[in-house]
Amino acid sequence: MEKKKLETLFKRHYGDMLRTAVMLLHDEAESKDVVHDIFARLLNGQCDLQEETARNYLQTSVRNRCLNIMRNHRYQERVARMYLLDLDTTVMQTDLLAEELNALRKGIRLLEPPVCRDIIMEHFSSGMTFAQIARHHGVSETTIYKHLRHALQQLRTHLNTR
């Protein structure tokens, strides 16, 4: 497009285009960017503009560009909201896990007889096998299994009643 013709279009339509953009975006700086981008496209020859359709074309271009920007802002806001919700969920899950862990620790401290507490700690904390625990306590593996089953039942009851 000829620079002289483009300069005439700019002087004639810039004010209306800017008002339309400001009305849609509520941001003068961003609105100026929209109008300038449209004229930059015209300057680069990306569009051949006729005098009789120039006003409609320019106003439609402003409206469409503003709508795209508004859609992008809404998308960015949704992503930000989802991110914040994800952070809240993570914090809540961490708090819940800490509460459950504390309840489990309390339940282990309350196990009776004390041999059940020892066996459950040796098996789950130390990673000892039934055979190793049986040798350590001088009893059979079946006895260790029965104590462990009893301890787990007590823990289930404790955690379900809290």
Image (cartoon, rainbow, N blue to C red):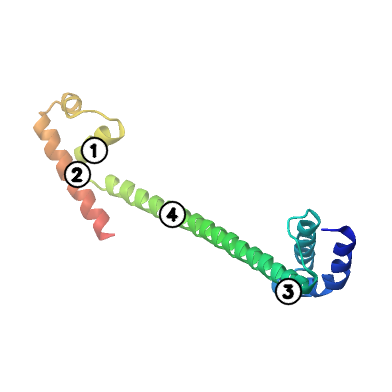
Label located before the other in sequence (2 or 1) = 1
Mark 1 and mark 4: Cα distance apart in space: 25 Å
Residue 154 in percent (x, y) is at: 20, 49
In front: label 3 or label 1: 3
In the rendered image, which residue does mark 3 sit on?
56
In the rendered image, which residue does mark 1 sit on?
120
Mark 3 and mark 1: Cα distance apart in space: 79 Å
Q: Are marks 4 and 3 in contact (CB under 8 Å)?
A: no
Mark 2 and mark 3: Cα distance apart in space: 80 Å
User: What secondary structure is found at the residue carrying circle 1?
Assistant: helix
User: What secondary structure is found at the residue carrying circle 3?
Assistant: helix
Q: Amino acid at mark 3?
A: Asn
Mark 4 and mark 3: Cα distance apart in space: 58 Å
Residue 2 versus residue 63 in the image, above or below: above
| Residue at figure coordinates x 59%, y 59% from the top left | 76
Residue 151, numbered label: 2
Q: Quadrant of the N terminus?
A: bottom right
Q: Are marks 2 and 1 in contact (CB under 8 Å)?
A: yes
Give whichever of 108, 7 is nearer the camera.
7
Q: Are marks 3 and 1 in contact (CB under 8 Å)?
A: no
